[in-house]
Amino acid sequence: MITRLRAENFKSWKDTSNLRLGRLTGLFGTNSSGKTSILQILPLLKQTAESPDRNRVLETGNIGTFLSVVHGYRKDEALKLCLG
């Protein structure tokens, strides 16, 4: 079970810090506060975990280009996604 999630430089989030996840986790907040962005991290991590090629380019699919996914549209920033 995933118990922790963290994203740095992902969409509207500069750093989510460690988000604790339980068996049932609800995401609440105002419109455009980044709730959906948190959920979009999971398929990206799944893609990375399933790929045997660590040099493979991240496919962002329907969430946009890398530039639109990285916080502040800064192409020189590293995108960091972690779970535990």
Image (spheres, rainbow, N blue to C red):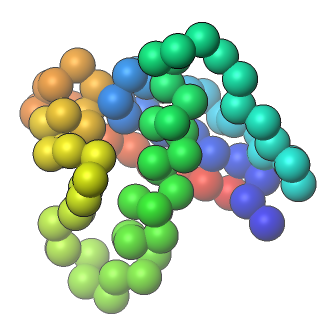
Residue at the limit of the structure toward the bottom, as seen here: 52
Residue at the limit of the structure toward the right, as seen here: 23
Does 3 sit above or below residue 45? Answer: above
Residue at 73% over, 59% down: 2
Residue at 42% over, 82% down: 50
Residue at 47% over, 49% down: 41
Where residue 73 sits, quadrant-wise, is: top left
Q: Quadrant of the C terminus?
A: bottom right
Residue 25 place in picture, x, y as percent: 81, 42
Residue 15 place in picture, x, y as percent: 48, 25
Left or right placement of residue 35 versus residue 70 in this view: right
Residue 53 place in picture, x, y as percent: 25, 83
Does 12 sit above or below residue 26? Answer: above
Left or right placement of residue 5 versus residue 10 in this view: right
What is the count of numbered marks? 0
Q: Quadrant of the N terminus?
A: bottom right
Does 34 sit above or below residue 21? Answer: above
Residue 16 place in picture, x, y as percent: 55, 27
Left or right placement of residue 4 versus residue 73 in this view: right
Residue at the limit of the structure toward the front, as seen here: 31
